[in-house]
Amino acid sequence: MTDPTPDSRPLWSFDDAGAAGAWRPLHDGVMGGVSSGSVATLDGTVRFEGDVRPENGGGFASFRIALNGDRIAGATGLRLRVRGDGQVYKLALRAGQHAVSWQAPFQTVASEWTVADLPFDALAPTWRGRSVPDAPPFEPAEVDELGIIIANEQYGPFTVAVAWIDALFASEES
């Protein structure tokens, strides 16, 4: 008998200087907040930085990119190589603009590269930051957007760089 081990397949690497252009910032300004953030490509990474502010009911910054769910159909999770500032970020996957957001947190280590494995069975369904216990099951093939979010009263400056994002698939070792 063999144990399943993950097989990774590249979704994105950010070697192209124009890679930042595919990401769309969406911060708490959509609800009156004043948090800010920008995205840039630097040294083969995509880097998100800004300032999360609590004023006017705000408190989050996010960066989103389109994802064809066919690319992760059958996957068991995602793997990200990140260099952060020691704060906790969330990976968010969604199917449709007003759909439930399936999220998993990942811890960064200040100024160090780390790899975060985020299995789909660890994703929690949320809507505007609140738990959705009666959400339908997560379906990777239906995903059309991936996001990186900082929230949960982590106010102040933030910086996180992503070198690559891979999809994880179950495989069997012989």
Image (cartoon, rainbow, N blue to C red):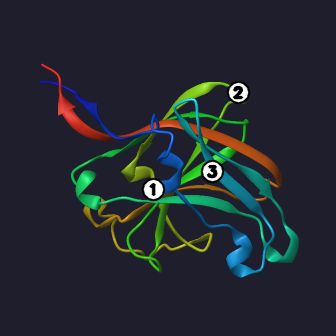
- The three-letter code of the residue at mark 2 reads Ser
The image position of residue 99, as x and y in percent, is 44, 77
At 87% from the left and 71% from the top, the residue drawn is 55
What distance separates the C-alpha of mark 2 from that of mark 3? 18 Å
What distance separates the C-alpha of mark 3 from that of mark 1? 25 Å
The label shown at residue 20 is none
Q: Are the residues flagged by discs 2 and 1 in contact, CB closer than 8 Å?
A: no
- Whichever of callouts 3 and 1 sits on the residue coming sooner in the sequence is 3
99 left or right of 144 in image: right
Label 1 sits on residue: 123
Label 3 sits on residue: 39
Badge 1 density bin: few <14, some 14–19, many ≥20, Cα 10 Å: some
128 left or right of 13 in image: right
Between label 2 and label 3, give the one nearer the viewer: 3
Between label 2 and label 1, give the one nearer the viewer: 2
Task: Tell me the quarter of the picture where residue 6 sits.
Answer: top left
- The three-letter code of the residue at mark 1 reads Leu
- Whichever of callouts 2 and 3 sits on the residue coming sooner in the sequence is 3
Up the image or down, 20 lies above or below 63; here it is above
Label 3 secondary element: strand
29 left or right of 48 in image: right
- Whichever of callouts 2 and 1 sits on the residue coming sooner in the sequence is 2
Label 2 sits on residue: 111
The image position of residue 144, as x and y in percent, is 36, 65
At 48% from the left and 72% from the top, the residue drawn is 133
Task: Tell me the quarter of the picture where residue 107 sits.
Answer: top right
Badge 2 density bin: few <14, some 14–19, many ≥20, Cα 10 Å: some
At 78% from the left and 74% from the top, the residue drawn is 33
What distance separates the C-alpha of mark 2 from that of mark 1? 26 Å
Outermost residue toward the right in this view: 55
Task: Tell me the quarter of the picture where residue 88 sits.
Answer: top right
30 left or right of 141 in image: right
